[in-house]
Image: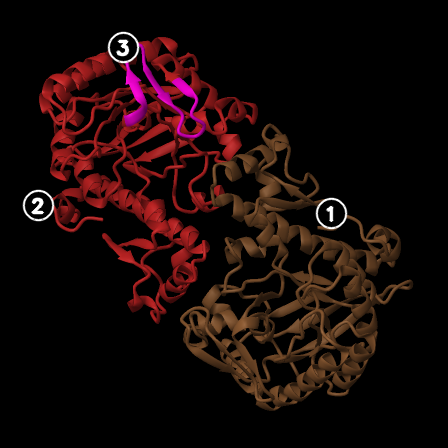
Chain colours: A red, B brown
């Protein structure tokens, strides 16, 4: 039986490792590079699936850890699976819960078997093993599921990172054995902290397993931004060319552009919706605080070059008014724009790669010195 | 110059005073009887104009008092008027601010000239006169604007209500003199408290002024529900037959059905969105608390007979999950349903009137004894 998952490269940049391609899933194609919005609790905060479809979203994420606690994967499965439960008919991805569990530093115990923690929701003790994570993800039913990995903190000694990365490798094999559904693709996750040689070694080990896709995990855990670039540059080229590459938890303009230059295809981040709930919009590579008085009488669209519902319908003055009036509709409208904006950024990069003009057109974002990057 | 406003009666019920008609405005027709959703601060809370259009909404309200304080009518006008500011191209109505100002019982002084109060937003002293209210409403630019009236509390002595109602009559004449825009219709408001003879007298006085529409105000101020019916039955038949009649602030199934039976055409209420923010849905004439555990595993639509986006896309289990997860998307989805439901109720009554089956089909809601009415 042939796999319903495949990655086809359509163009390679002649100056960088950037590439444009299509990742096929049972719920449709994902044209890469592509930003993926995050729907933590089976919804992208304040945005309906119909609105989400207008942003250009293709693959949408949801979080295994959160859904396990609430409402529980059994309810999602009984509802017909994650797609039907939340009304999203496009491709979906669930993370493994590892990142969230390892962020609960006060309440967890880690052994070779797995992680034990107390639910912050109701205090009950939960034991999460690689097998449990895969079973939950098989039950939830996303197109792409992620291996259960250990995510070391930053900073962390080389010895500790090495031991953790080796454990993540052993856990991956347990995940592969536990995985039951051929209509779901299990992606492996490269760890290795900020140590390029550990990252390279892990990437090569994973590449040998011929998985349907690969992720770079354990970034955005507090390390300086320039280290993310170093990690990605060490890791991405070691991953198979015929499989999609996904940089987890990253979604700023600069980080995405630089990771794409290293050969990464997929990104996710809660930034667009989180910023929206703080009244901040992503416009032309900047973060704008729409509460600012300078927008009170600004009757122009948020971004005149943007085709999203918000920019086509409302003015900056209206958004500024909604925020000052504490109207929740502001969060919806700014979220729609911010998601559209980050997807558009990756779409523009894709178009540039296809025209082999990426390095030239995005030189500003590829420059080594970090500037003010939202 | 002929007025852009007209009311045409299409059918009269043979058993009650109910009627079906069309009220024409510069931004399109309103088929009556019809429930009108409320967009207090130039937005219907958590619902976009695109979503609102799918609920069957025709005329939408906004509040002069709130918009005067925030963002100020000058900003709305500079943005191109209320319709453009909030992105609603259908008919709109603004209230006069009277109801809100008279609710600020601790901080106001009332004289023949007008009302003085401290802004709860920034503490500044605001003097609102009939002329000011009309000027603000002329500046905002809704299709229908309301006279500035005094809204007596409940309970209130007959003498005080009579004096107040006479003042409202004098204020109405000042409003008519102040009103500047022929593309806006100024509606008069019948006051008179819970005294049927004062209501009748006020209605007759107003009828003589040949206004483009008439409202029944000062209800839902704390009086027992059965008194609302008495007030409406005393007032509505005294109003001109060739003008629309609007019962302000009312929007429960029973109150609307009984008011329609007395000849009322238009209603507004914040109930559908306020209930939604408490996780409550209007289904088949009842209020359901969707947080209830009985919905956790209920994979049916909220209302299988409802064509709204929420009922066509999601299950009760999903809405229950969103509420428990404190996801704001729940408010949007339930608001869409609740607004659709109350509009559908008035649409069903309209269809029944046109078929002359209203008294029969809605006998349950027209029965004199109040039951559990949401």
Disc 1 element: loop
Q: CA distance from mark 2 to mark 3?
A: 41 Å
Are the numbered discs 3 and 1 placed on the same chain, yes or no? Answer: no
Query: Between tags 2 and 1, which lies in front?
Result: 1
Within 10 Å of disc 1 (Cα), the crowding (few <14, some 14-19, many 20+) is some
Chain on which label 3 sits: A
**In the rendered image, which residue does mark 3 sit on?**
A112
Point out residue B118 in the picture as x, y percentages from the top left corner. Answer: 47, 75
Q: Callout 2: residue from which chain?
A: A
Percent x, y of residue B104: 55, 71
Alpha carbon separation for disc pair 2 and 1? 63 Å
Q: Are marks 2 and 1 in contact (CB under 8 Å)?
A: no
Task: Report in which chain the residue with disc 1 lies.
Answer: B
Mark 3, secondary structure of its residue: loop
Left or right, B56 with respect to A42, comes to right
Q: Which residues are magenta?
A: A106-126
Q: Nearer the viewer, residue A288 or B183?
A: A288
Nearer-the-camera pick, B279 or B27: B279
Tell me where residue A8 sits by quadrant. Answer: top left
Tag of residue B285: 1
Identify the residue under disc 2. A369
- The answer to whether residue A63 is above or below residue B256 is above
> In the picture provided, is B242 more to the left or to the right than A92?
right
* Element class at badge 2: loop
- Do we see residue B54 in this rendering? no
């Amino acid at each position: 039986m042939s796999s319903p998952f495949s990655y086809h490269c359509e163009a390679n940049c002649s100056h960088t490792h950037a590439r444009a391609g299509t990742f096929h899933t049972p719920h449709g194609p994902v044209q890469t590079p592509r930003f993926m919005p995050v729907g933590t609790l089976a919804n992208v905060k304040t945005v309906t699936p119909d609105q989400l479809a207008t942003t250009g979203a293709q693959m949408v994420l949801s979080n295994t850890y959160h859904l396990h606690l609430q409402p529980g994967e059994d309810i999602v499965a009984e509802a017909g699976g994650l797609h039907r439960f939340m009304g999203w008919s496009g491709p979906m991805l669930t993370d493994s819960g590892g990142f969230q569990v390892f962020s609960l530093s006060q309440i967890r115990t880690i052994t070779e078997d797995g992680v034990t923690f107390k639910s912050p929701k109701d205090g009950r003790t939960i034991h999460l093993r690689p097998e449990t994570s895969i079973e939950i993800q098989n039950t939830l039913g996303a197109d792409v599921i992620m291996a259960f990995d250990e995510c070391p903190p930053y900073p962390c000694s080389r010895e500790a990172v090495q031991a953790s990365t080796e454990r993540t490798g052993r856990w991956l094999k347990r995940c592969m054995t536990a995985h039951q559904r051929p209509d779901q693709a299990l992606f492996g996750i490269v760890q290795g902290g900020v140590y390029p040689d550990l990252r390279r070694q892990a990437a090569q080990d994973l590449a040998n397993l011929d998985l349907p896709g690969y992720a770079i995990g354990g970034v955005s855990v507090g390390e300086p931004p320039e280290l993310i670039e170093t990690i990605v540059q060490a890791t991405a080229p070691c991953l198979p060319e015929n499989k999609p590459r996904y940089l987890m938890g990253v979604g700023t303009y600069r980080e995405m552009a630089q990771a794409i230059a290293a050969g990464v295809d997929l990104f996710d981040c809660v930034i667009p919706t989180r910023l929206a709930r703080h009244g901040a919009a992503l416009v032309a590579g900047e973060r704008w605080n729409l509460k600012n008085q300078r927008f009170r009488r600004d009757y122009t669209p948020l971004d005149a070059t943007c085709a999203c519902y918000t920019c086509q319908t409302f003015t900056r003055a209206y958004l500024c008014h909604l925020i000052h009036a504490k109207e929740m509709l502001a969060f919806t409208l700014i979220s729609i724009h911010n998601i559209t904006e980050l997807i558009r950024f990756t779409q523009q990069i894709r178009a540039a790669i296809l025209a082999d003009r990426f390095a030239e057109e995005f030189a500003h974002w590829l420059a080594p010195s970090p500037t003010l990057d939202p």
